[in-house]
Amino acid sequence: MGQKQNMQAQTADTRIAGLRRSLTLWDLILYGVVVLQPVAPTSVFGVLSDRGHGHVVTTILVAMVGMLFTAVNYGRMARVYPSAGSAFTYVGQEINPVLGYVTGWSMVMDYMLNPIICTIWCSQQAHAFSPQVPYWTWAIFFAALFTTLNVQGVKSSARVNAGLAAGMGAVIAVFFVAATRYFLHHFDHHAASLTRPFYDPETFKFRSVLGSTSIAVLTYIGFDGISNLSEESENPRRDIFLATVLPCFLIGILSACEVYRAQLIWPASEPFPNEDTAFVSVAQRAWPPLFAVMGLTLLVANFGSGMGAQLGAARLLYGMGRSNALPKSFFGVVDPRRQVPRNNVVFVGLIALAGAFTVSYALGAEMLNFGALIAFMGVNAAALVHYYIRAAHRNIRDLLLPVAGFLICLALWLGLSRPAKIAGLVWMFVGIAFGAWKTKGFRGNLINFDVPQET
């Protein structure tokens, strides 16, 4: 009897120490859709139209194809390593622990910046709606709200995600109806107007469309966060792959439909009143009441993205803390009651609040790309090593998928602005210096990649 009680106690301790497997495939897809946002291209629509000379639909679709290569490799690697560490674990296990640490550190920048820029955007938009409330009050409010919801547990976050996805989907449906009605009443009866958003022979320039595509990739940043929930998925070896690829594809198709209608309403030859808020102007032209509705929807979208990003950042820090890449006593701890890495959630919330007062939205967004694309390159390289170089049975698919994904991400990374590269390299230097100090010149074991057993 005493031995049985001891075994039960050990089992309970194991459950407390780990993350709870409670997320279904539907939960994961909803999480991915909300992080990517059903209104993903709206905030950059004006910039894409200007850079691509109106070929926004084309840039969105080309960027989707490029990101799907990386999404597929993320999903495939999640089958091999169902761990919360994501790219950090894949690179460390398949290539080298030090490179895994560097990848993880770049992801920390990516994941830290996403909650920061979402906090900034939400606070600015809320301040525009209620200018009598100062910006700093809104920043504190949103940072605290993100943290509180995520501390409640991952299931609570999943329920909120379902509500956010439904709300954004409803507004987009209203926009589709309004845009279709407007177009039918103003149709110029020229068939060329229907295909111009895809290809306009008068304005098409390959370099311009390629440059616009590098910006359009922002539409898909965040799909990798699904893999950080591997240890909370009920069936990670199946669901993480599907939940990584499907949201990327679904958001890509939905985004293309959104900007297609927007370009039919507002041709590229007509300048926008304000490039940054171009889609809101399009919505107003389609149906005047949509001006306020779309602004509120974008606020809600960034709220969902910020909350999901903080959730992903906390799981990433937990993976690195458990593996001793970061101090385990703080970052590798799970709250025994909620079974979430509470320390990390609060830590990310404090960083987001500080960033809301110190970092500009524009620089934060570009730095986010710096870290994300390094991680994407690392995952593609890890997939190449695992499925082709080390595999007993090789096929051409296992070579082409990761190589194509790596080269696309490299080209996009090289196209980042100089300030973003400088800031990103400073961040990487700090992280590498910390790793060197921790291991006395990388002579010790930097990381312990013990992947827990599935329960």
Image (tube, rainbow, N blue to C red):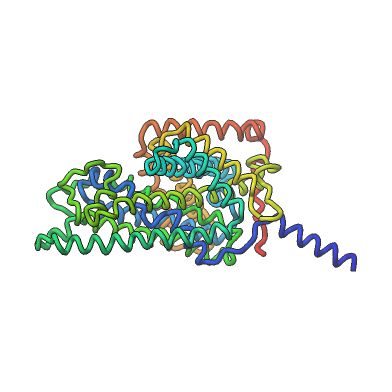
Q: Residue furthest right?
A: 2
* Residue found at x 22% / y 53%: 285
Left or right: 83 as drawn, with respect to 371: right
* Residue found at x 36% / y 55%: 39
Q: Residue furthest left?
A: 189
* Residue found at x 28% / y 50%: 279
What x and y, as percent, mark residue 220? 39, 52
What x and y, as percent, mark residue 201? 13, 52
Can residue 400 be seen here? The reply is: no
Image quarter where the N terminus lies is bottom right
What x and y, as percent, mark residue 96? 57, 45
Image position of 50 with respect to 25: above or below: above
Q: Quadrant of residue 13?
A: bottom right
* Residue found at x 53% / y 60%: 158
What x and y, as percent, mark residue 162? 48, 62
Query: Foreground: 410 or 291?
Result: 291
Left or right: 321 as drawn, with respect to 115: right
Query: Foreground: 437 or 262?
Result: 262
Query: Foreground: 428 or 189?
Result: 189
Q: Quadrant of residue 64?
A: bottom left
Left or right: 113 as drawn, with respect to 183: right
